[in-house]
């Protein structure tokens, strides 16, 4: 709205304003939302019986659907400070809403049935792929010809034109990122902290990609992509505000409502900026969480034994005797180092 009313109000100032508003709104309304969730979720989120035994005691009764706080405050900030006439912005809003609704339905039935696996995997994946396909098609159509189907390998200045394979690839990136963040949301503060680091990094990537001299920062020039920096800033503020309530001992969980939507928008931003490979570098903690589950399942089917003590991998470290706080801080530190490694692309 501000971008339409005041065209000279720069992206940087609007990004800072969006960050501040989403953070303040989260801190103001977070407590009230938790009260409402407690009222309607008498038993809180059902805890996995096959997870760490300590979680059955420490996390019992904690409400879920905290993603409502993140998504609602971020969307308000985006509507106010981003230019919603741009394809990338309203596609971002569509992803947040559609994936958020999918996650909300799953969380609702989890709480209703007191079952940690409420929505079937097939139904969830169908809804994810449907939204991702629509988003990928719009993003590709809104990106200039010549780069819209290109897979960029940073650091080595190598490109592959995937042609008609690009859209299926983009769908996998968006849905894969959604599920990767969902798997990472298992410890107090873990997913929200990792997302803050990722959104800060990709906010910078989006900003530089939208500049006419993007090539000076080793980015592909994507017209109007700088506007996504406002989206990222809104999400950083919302996640930071949510982290205040989600830090140990968490008063609320993000739930699928937040994790599915936030992972999807992270993947979509990587597609918008043509930095899908860079997402795998900076978001390698998310990748490792996903790979640990895949390895565990395949190894168990083949041998009848577990490769990890427990999957996702953050539970493996808990089973090794690490405290929840130690796991979270080490994963955050790893993500921060990876973001610094990723930032080297700007100076390559």
Image: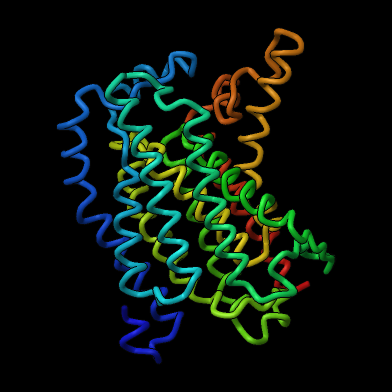
Residue 51: give x, y in percent of width and height. 48, 18
**Camera sees residue 42:** yes
Relative to 19, 346 lies left or right: right
Query: Image height check: is 161 above or below 215?
Result: above
Nearer the observer, 130 or 29:
130
**Camera sees residue 247:** no
Relative to 164, 327 lies left or right: left
Relative to 140, 126 lies left or right: left
Residue 274, located in which quarter of the rendered image? bottom right
Query: Image height check: is 283 above or below 249?
Result: below
Nearer the observer, 6 or 252:
6
**What residue is shown at x 54% (from left), y 50% (from top)?**
132
**What residue is shown at x 29% (from left), y 67% (from top)?**
21
**What residue is shown at x 41% (from left), y 61% (from top)?**
93
Q: Quadrant of the C terminus?
A: bottom right
Residue 10: give x, y in percent of width and height. 43, 85
Query: Image height check: is 174 above or below 142?
Result: above
Query: Most extreme residue toward the bottom, as rendered?
Result: 8
């Amino acid at each position: 709205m501000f971008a339409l009313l005041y065209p000279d109000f720069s992206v940087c100032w609007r990004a800072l304003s969006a960050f501040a508003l989403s953070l303040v709104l989260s801190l103001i309304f977070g407590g009230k939302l938790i009260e409402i969730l407690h009222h309607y979720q008498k038993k809180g989120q059902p805890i996995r019986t096959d997870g760490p035994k300590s979680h059955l005691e420490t996390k019992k009764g904690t409400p879920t659907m905290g993603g409502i706080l993140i998504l609602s405050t971020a969307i308000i900030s985006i509507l106010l400070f981003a230019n919603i006439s741009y394809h990338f912005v309203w596609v971002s809003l569509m992803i947040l809403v559609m994936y958020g609704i999918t996650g909300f339905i799953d969380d609702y039935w989890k709480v209703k049935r007191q079952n940690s696996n409420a929505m079937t995997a097939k139904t969830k994946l169908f809804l994810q792929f449907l939204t991702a396909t629509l988003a990928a098609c719009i993003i590709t159509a809104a990106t200039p010809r010549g780069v819209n189907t290109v897979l960029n390998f940073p650091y080595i200045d190598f490109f592959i034109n995937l042609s008609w394979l690009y859209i299926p690839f983009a769908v996998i990136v968006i849905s894969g990122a959604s599920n990767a963040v969902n798997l990472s949301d298992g410890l107090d503060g873990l997913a929200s902290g990792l997302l803050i680091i990722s959104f800060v990094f990709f906010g910078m990537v989006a900003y530089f990609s939208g500049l006419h001299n993007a090539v000076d920062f080793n980015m592909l020039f994507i017209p109007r992509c700088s506007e996504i920096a406002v989206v990222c800033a809104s999400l950083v503020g919302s996640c930071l505000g949510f982290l205040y309530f989600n830090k140990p001992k968490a008063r609320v969980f993000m739930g699928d409502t937040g994790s599915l939507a936030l992972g999807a928008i992270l993947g979509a931003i990587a597609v918008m900026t043509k930095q899908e490979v860079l997402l795998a570098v900076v978001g390698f903690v998310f990748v490792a969480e996903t790979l640990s589950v895949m390895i565990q399942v395949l190894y168990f089917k083949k041998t009848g034994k577990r490769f990890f003590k427990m999957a996702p991998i953050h539970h493996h470290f808990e089973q090794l005797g690490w405290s929840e706080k130690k796991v979270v801080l080490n994963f955050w530190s790893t993500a921060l180092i990876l973001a610094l490694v990723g930032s080297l692309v700007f100076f390559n």
